[in-house]
Image (cartoon, rainbow, N blue to C red):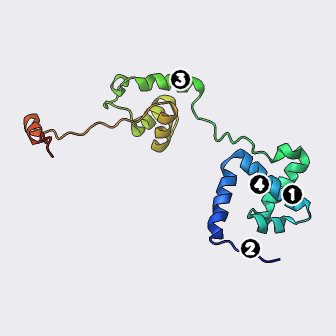
Amino acid sequence: MKRITIPDAEIFIAAIQDELSRTKEGRYFHRLAVILHVLRGASAYEASRAFGFSSRTIEYWVNRLVSNGLNGLWDGKHPGRPSRLSAFQKQKLRKELRRSPRDMGYDQNMWDGVLLSHHLEKDYSISLSVRQCQRLFHQMGFSLQRPRRQASEADPALREAFKKTSTSG
């Protein structure tokens, strides 16, 4: 039988792999195809070369299939690292972030990652990096606000005169 040649095959391979890995269902069906190849007599090494997964991963999937059936091939939950703040502490912190930092005894007008990191260390004995504090703002529904900079020596009358007022362009 004549071999089929596909121009730009590598691009199609990458696109199809992305499509398969995008959803839980795609990953599940991809695992089914790999396992089916093994069930038809291919070794884990042959399936590894054919599908691009490590042979150890394929062995792991086969073991999951044998021990849990088809449900074993679905992705499990990936909860991540538990939060250092308890639910009660998060609730308390949310109330504190709604207040001005000046009300909390700091000499800033707005909360930022550096100040939140310092605040957590001082009041909660929890050490978080500045970047993690910025993520915490986002998780709690806050957005980081930056003050609008203005030159302190700028004359408001001269600034208005400098602005373009012409509509003719």
Residue 43 position, x and y percent, is 87, 66
Asked which secondary structure carries label 3, the reply is helix
Q: Which residue is mark 2?
A: 4
Distance of label 1 from label 3 (alpha carbons): 50 Å
Asked which secondary structure carries label 2, the reply is loop
Q: Is residue 124 above or below residue 127?
A: above
Q: Which residue is mark 3?
A: 91
Distance of label 2 from label 3 (alpha carbons): 62 Å
Categorize mark 2 by other alpha carbons within 10 Å: few (<14), some (14-19), many (20+): few
Q: Are marks 1 and 3 in contact (CB under 8 Å)?
A: no
Q: Are marks 1 and 2 in contact (CB under 8 Å)?
A: no
Give the quadrant of residue 97.
Answer: top left
Residue 78 relative to residue 48: left or right: left
Q: Which residue is mark 4?
A: 30
Q: Is residue 7 above or below residue 110?
A: below
Front residue of this view, candidates 46 and 98: 46
Q: Amino acid at mark 3?
A: Gln
